[in-house]
Image: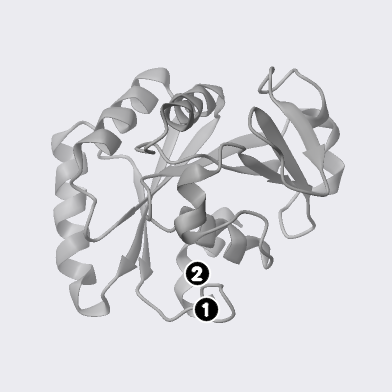
C-alpha cells in the first residue's frame, strides 16, 4: 500500500492557513489568529486508516508525536479525522516569516518533506518576497504547488487573480493551481462553505 500524499499548508503570518485547515476539517485542530506565530508544533491531520504512516519516524523524524492534544515545542500533533479521504494528509506548518527563528527553520524542514505544498497568501500580501523565494525552492525540488489566494474582496477577484497569475507565469510558476477564497465573515470561527468551496472541491 502506498503512503498517503503529504500536503503541507504553508504561508505567512496572518494569511489564514490555520483557519483554512480548521474549516476543511470542520473542527478547530490548530490555533488561528494571534496565537499561531508562537506555536512551534505543527499539526498533521489524516484519515484514521493512514495514521500508522505518521506514528513512527519514517516521515518527519525527530518530531515527537502527540495524539489527542497539542504537542509541545519540537513535537508533531497527529489528528486522525474522517473529514479527509484516505491517502491525503494535511500538515499545518508554522509561519514562514515567523518572528521566531525556530518556526521559520521548521517550516522549511516541513517543506522539504512535502509531496505537495498548498501555499496560502492574501490579496494584500501575495507580492511579498519571502513566499516567492520558497515557491521557487519548492518548484526546484519538484514539489507539487498550489496557491490559495485567501480573503480576496469579491470586487477585486478578477484583477488580483489576473495579476497573480501573470506573476506566477513571469517567475516560471505558470503551472501552479490558483484557488481563490473570497473574503467572507466567519461562522463560528470557520469559513462558510461557499467561500471554502474552491479549496474543498479541489481536494476532493
User: Residue 87's image quarter?
Assistant: top right
Marks 2 & 1, CB-CB < 8 Å contact: yes
Mark 2 highlights which residue? 196
x and y percent of residue 105 in the render?
A: 45, 24
Disc 2 element = helix
Mark 2: few/some/many CA within 10 Å (<14, 14-19, 20+): many
x and y percent of residue 183 in the render?
A: 35, 74
Q: Is residue 12 left or right of residue 26?
A: left
Q: CA distance from mark 2 to mark 1?
A: 6 Å
The residue drawn where x is 16% and y is 44% is: 167
Residue situated in front as seen by the camera: 3 or 75: 75
The residue drawn where x is 51% and y is 35% is: 116
x and y percent of residue 108 in the render?
A: 45, 25
Residue situated in front as seen by the camera: 184 or 94: 94
Quarter of the picture containing the N terminus is top right
Mark 1 highlights which residue? 192
Q: Is residue 98 left or right of residue 133?
A: right
Residue situated in front as seen by the camera: 159 or 57: 57
Quarter of the picture containing the C terminus is bottom right
Figure check: 176 above or below 53: below
The residue drawn where x is 58% and y is 56% is: 31
Amino acid at each position: 500500500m502506498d503512503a498517503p500524499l503529504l500536503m503541507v499548508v504553508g504561508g505567512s503570518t496572518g494569511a489564514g492557513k490555520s483557519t483554512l485547515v480548521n474549516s476543511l476539517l470542520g473542527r478547530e485542530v490548530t490555533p488561528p489568529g494571534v496565537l499561531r506565530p508562537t506555536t512551534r508544533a505543527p499539526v498533521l491531520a489524516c484519515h484514521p486508516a493512514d495514521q500508522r504512516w505518521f506514528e513512527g519516524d519514517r516521515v518527519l523524524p525527530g518530531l515527537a508525536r502527540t495524539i489527542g492534544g497539542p504537542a509541545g515545542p519540537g513535537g508533531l500533533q497527529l489528528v486522525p479525522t474522517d473529514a479527509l479521504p484516505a491517502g491525503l494528509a494535511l500538515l499545518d506548518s508554522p509561519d514562514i516569516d515567523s518572528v521566531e527563528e525556530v518556526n521559520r527553520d521548521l517550516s522549511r524542514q516541513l517543506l522539504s518533506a512535502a509531496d505537495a505544498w498548498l501555499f496560502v497568501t492574501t490579496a494584500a500580501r501575495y507580492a511579498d518576497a519571502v513566499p516567492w523565494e520558497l515557491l521557487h525552492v519548492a518548484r526546484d525540488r519538484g514539489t507539487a504547488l498550489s496557491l490559495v489566494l485567501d480573503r480576496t474582496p469579491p470586487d477585486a477577484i478578477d484583477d488580483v487573480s489576473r495579476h497573480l497569475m501573470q506573476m506566477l507565469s513571469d517567475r516560471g510558476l505558470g503551472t501552479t493551481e490558483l484557488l481563490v477564497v473570497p473574503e467572507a465573515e466567519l461562522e463560528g470561527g470557520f469559513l462558510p462553505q461557499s467561500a471554502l468551496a474552491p479549496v474543498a472541491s479541489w481536494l476532493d
